[in-house]
Image (cartoon, rainbow, N blue to C red):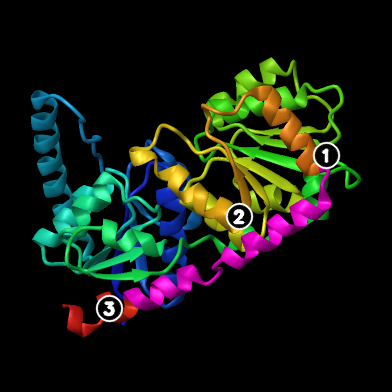
Amino acid sequence: MPRTIVLAGGGTGGHVYPALAIGDALRARGQDLLYYGDPTRLEGRVVEKRGYPLRPVRAMGYPRAGILGKVVFAVTLAREVIKAAMKLRSDGVQAVIGFGGYVSAPTILAAWLLRIPRAIHESNVTPGLANKLCARVADLVLVTYPQSIHRVPGKAHKEVVGCPVNPRVLEGNRSKALERYDLSAEKPVVLFVGGSLGAARINDLAVAAARQGSRDFQIVQITGPAYLADVRSALGGQPASVALVGYEHHMADAYAASDLVVCRAGSSTLAELTVLGKPSVLIPSPNVTDNHQEANARGMEQAGAALVFTEAELTTSRFLEMVSNLVGDRASLRLMSEAASRLGKADSAEHAAHIIDVLLLSSKSR
């Protein structure tokens, strides 16, 4: 019998895309899905396009300092938990799965108060604050990396499932993608992407690469919606052999066209790189909780699947020389691709859906 399940969380692709991947796997098993998130953030742009009704939930980030800020946070959280509980009752929800981001906390806490079965999925090596809070009241915790298990608090059963990816990223066709981007099949392509929101430093590096007179590679640059106009202005339009995209709804095309990917090290992105076997240059964001992106990236580096550089150590000149050398070294790219493929888990979403079915939705968990 179908159950109504809520996916809760958002703000960035690292929360939203694993949620949608697991949602697709649960929907294929006959379950009814809703999404609780913030319509003003990423989930507001992508969730309903994937066929999931979106229920609005608001939340504020936890203040790092100041008693007044913490009091306001507590009052706001309590108010949103009450609102989420009313939505859960109205929607007849029978299970909730949280994916992190502050917006996930009110719904998970509301499910706890209503005794609705609840799980969380943690994408990163180092759990975020919201998931650390929610893990204490969860019935089931799913993690991407084995080393995360001892970092997640609470007594819930913990299971390693990997970071689920949208199976649509596997559907890219290189010839069609190159045609769409108006690029040649004769030269290699470097994909620059700074995550769903974009990244200023990666955009700066892509612009510097595009301006190189001696450049022997083509570029696909996904700027992030807020950066597109500035990047186009910095390039004086759109140079030949450079494809600019503000937000890419068809990442399968971007990956299919690329020979090398320059990107952040969010867990969702790394999961896609490994499933596709893409060599990469990872520049972890320094603006994340507990520097978790660098922790994610170092595992890729140790496996030989990626080169890792922090923003602090990477100069533009060093980057341009490194990328120019690497993209022309087919043997090194092949070895990196093979190493990435060995880390890939294409069945993570189905594995997670199975665990949720058995351990969360079974009569024993009620």
Vertical comparison of 264 with 22: above or below: above
Vertical comparison of 206 with 34: above or below: above
Q: Is residue 71 left or right of residue 257?
A: left
Q: Amino acid at mark 3?
A: Leu
Quarter holding the N terminus? bottom left
Residues 240 and 36: in front is 240
Q: Residue 61: x percent and y percent?
A: 25, 35
Q: CA distance from mark 2 to mark 3?
A: 29 Å
Q: Amino acid at mark 2?
A: Leu
Q: Residues within 10 Å of mark 3 (few under 14, many from 20)?
A: some
Q: CA distance from mark 2 to mark 1?
A: 23 Å
In the image, the segment drawn in magenta is 328-356
> Which element carries disc 2, helix, strand or loop?
helix
Q: Is residue 158 left or right of residue 240?
A: left
Q: Residues within 10 Å of mark 2 (few under 14, many from 20)?
A: many
Residue for badge 2: 273
Q: CA distance from mark 1 to mark 3?
A: 48 Å
Contact check, label 1 and label 3, Cβ < 8 Å: no
Q: Is residue 339 left or right of residue 104?
A: right
Q: Which mark is residue 202?
A: none
Q: Is residue 316 left or right of residue 165?
A: right
Contact check, label 2 and label 3, Cβ < 8 Å: no
